[in-house]
Each structure stands twice: as structure tokens, then as C-alpha cells.
Amino acid sequence: MLVKKEKYMDGKLVFHAFLVVGKPNSIVTTLPFELLKKRFQRELFHLENALIIGQKMANRMLEEFSELILQNEVVQAYFFPNYILQGVNIKTAEQVIHLQDNFELTAEMCFSERLNSIEFFHIQQRFLMAQKYITRTANKLNLDTFTAKYLTTDTSKFCFRSYLNEYKFLLEFEDEGVECAFVLNANYQLKMFISI
């Protein structure tokens, strides 16, 4: 049995959750699973090991768990941003969840909310999970170095053009053996990601 939930805050869709009833039960959401494990370890254990009898009980348990997520202020940073809400549906949620399991960082990737919003949303979540570490250990780049090293394809040049007046920080970081750069605004929010 599969139960699906869309959760809203102030009339705005903020995340999807799915509960697969089995032995054990499993839950997937559009939020990073590592975050849920960290914040809701006890609740997840209970949900995964509960004996769920019938659709009504499954709905109630997923609703209760989703409400806990909704009330957690730390988790709210990982909710759907405005740029992804224009066409978000169950298929979009499934794409986000699939990326969580199967995303592989390779060279010559370029992501931004304007270019490829679903993939960028996933990258943004990964960035948020490690933001303190990345901003503390990454190398700062000046515009000339960033341009010469990272803006080598037509896609990356086109993409960066829209952030030229918006960026504040250019950071270089190595992840999974791939060199990458983050374009951040003054609030340290990720605006663009490039790998080489």
C-alpha cells in the first residue's frame, strides 16, 4: 500500500511525502532523508516499524509525521522554493526523490533555478546540508579566475549572465573528486552551481 501527502504552509505547497506500507514500512519525501534521520530519528523508527492496518491508519500516521516536519523550523529551509512551484506535481516530487537516490556529480554540470529547476533544487538541498563546512573550507575566487576556469561552455556563460549583478561570493570546492564552483548572493544563498 502506498499513501501520498502534499503539505501546505500559508496556502503554499512546501513538500510531498510518501509512505510505503510493508515489512518494514518506508517513508520518502522531497526533503533530504539525512535531515529527517537527524531531526526525527525516534519518530522515523516508530513509523518504519509500526504495524499499519489499512489505508485509514496509514493516512493518519503519515499525516502526523508530516505535521511534525511542518512545525520544525530547521526543516523549513528545505521546503519547495517559489521558483519550483510553478509546475510542481506528484511527477516533480518523484523526480526530486529519484535524484536523492541516483544523483551523480560529474564534470561539466551547470545548474541554476532558471536553467534546470528540479536538479538545482536538489543541489541547493545538498548545499544547505553542508553549507557551514563549504563556506568555511572553500576557496574564494575572483571574477576573472572564475570566468576563465568555470565559464567554459555556452550554457555556463549564458546561465551566469543572469547572475552577474546578483552574485556576491564565488566559491571553489571539491566534492566527490569533482571541482565545482558555487555562485552565492549576499545572504549566502546558492544561485548557481558549476562543475568542471
Image (tube, rainbow, N blue to C red):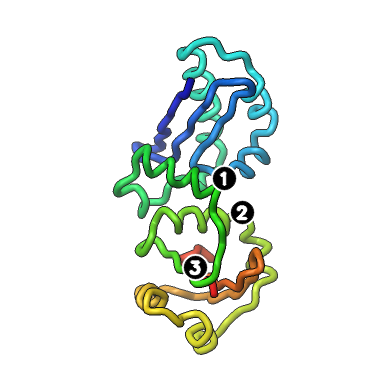
Q: Quadrant of the C terminus?
A: bottom right
Q: Residues within 10 Å of mark 1 (few under 14, many from 20)?
A: some
Q: To which residue does mark 2 refer?
A: 129
At x 63% / y 20%, what residue is drawn? 23
Dot 1 and dot 2 residues touching (CB under 8 Å): yes
Residue 2 placement (x, y as % from top left): 47, 24
Dot 2 and dot 3 residues touching (CB under 8 Å): no
Q: CA distance from mark 2 to mark 3?
A: 15 Å
Decide if residue 67 is on the left or right side of residue 9.
right
Q: Amino acid at mark 2?
A: Met
At x 51% / y 24%, what residue is drawn? 62
Q: Amino acid at mark 3?
A: Phe
Counting labels gives 3
* Element type at mark 2: helix
Picture quadrant of residue 25: top right
Marked residue nearer the N-terminal end (1 or 2): 1
Q: To which residue does mark 3 refer?
A: 193
Q: Residues within 10 Å of mark 3 (few under 14, many from 20)?
A: many
Of badges 2 and 3, nearer the viewer stands 3
Q: Is residue 118 above or below residue 63?
A: below
Q: Is residue 85 above or below residue 44?
A: below
At x 46% / y 81%, what residue is drawn? 151
**Disc assigned to residue 32:** 1
Residue 37 placement (x, y as % from top left): 66, 38
